[in-house]
Amino acid sequence: MQISAGTIFVGCGVILMFAASHPAPLRKGRWLKMLISLPVLGVAGWLFDQGSPASVQPLVGCVIAFSLLWLNNFTWFAAEAVHRVVHGRPNQGGGGFVPDYRGTRSRVEDGDLEQAIEYVQFELSKEPGNFEGRWLLAAIYQEQRKFKEAAEQLDLILACPTSTPAQIASARAALQQVRAQQIQLDSTRERK
């Protein structure tokens, strides 16, 4: 049994679709993109098998259509690569002077909390009093059961002169919860 070049072409396209939609920020809408891409890949594979000069233009058209469907994904990978070359570290989600916590949220969704802490600290270096960053960092520490560190972040929110009354109220409520969790953890340790 011989596998045709068109079948290999389609198989590589399917593998490329899964690889291009693996990172968490790129998963939204991937099944729809794949559903639309499969017929395009099928036609491209069939044209690839034809191998006649007349099939080159439609084949190029199919490749362009596939590329346009997946342009955002490919651009994301290219931006990540350029960022690594220029800055020597992975893209942490934001650029410029305004904090951007997309990279942090992506790492939290992936369960990589240590990397998420690095990302949020990088973004907080741009604006140390940023409520969203401090709140996110407190939540990550709370998830890791590092209640002392979570309380420190909430205290920073309370001490920040730019915190709104709503933010202060949220931070106070969260601080009470974190302190209660710390007391519960301490009493559990004492019993052991």
Image (tube, grey):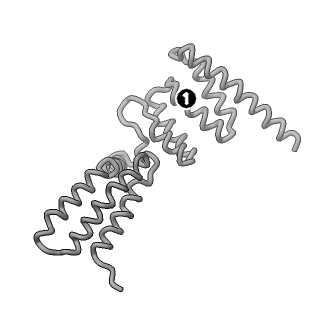
Vertical arrangement, residue 49 with respect to residue 153, above or below: below
Of residues 66 and 42, the one nearer the viewer is 42
Secondary-structure class at tag 1: helix
Percent coordinates x, y for residue 118 in the rendering: 52, 41
Point out the image quarter for the N terminus: bottom left
Give the left or right position of residue 161, taking residue 20 as reference: right
Number of callouts? 1
Residue at position x 16%, y 63% in the image? 58
Q: Which residue is situated farthest in the bottom direction here? A: 1
Residue at position x 80%, y 36% in the image? 186
Q: Mark 1 points at which residue?
A: 134
Percent coordinates x, y for residue 15 in the rendering: 39, 64
Residue at position x 29%, y 65% in the image? 42
Of residues 6 and 102, the one nearer the viewer is 6
Give the left or right position of residue 146, taking residue 90 as reference: right
Give the left or right position of residue 96, taking residue 130 as reference: left
Residue at position x 60%, y 38% in the image? 140
Q: Which residue is situated farthest in the right direction here? A: 191
Judge whether residue 163 can be spotted in this image.
Answer: yes
Q: On the image, which quarter does residue 174 sit in?
A: top right
Percent coordinates x, y for residue 46 in the rendering: 24, 70
Q: Counting other residues with Cα less than 10 Å from the Cα at mark 1, is it few (<14), some (14-19), or many (20 or more)?
A: many
Give the left or right position of residue 179, taking residue 16 as reference: right
Judge whether residue 89 can be spotted in this image.
Answer: no
User: Of the residues shown, which amino acid type is indicated by label 1?
Assistant: Arg
Percent coordinates x, y for residue 26 in the rendering: 41, 48
Point out the image quarter for the C terminus: top right
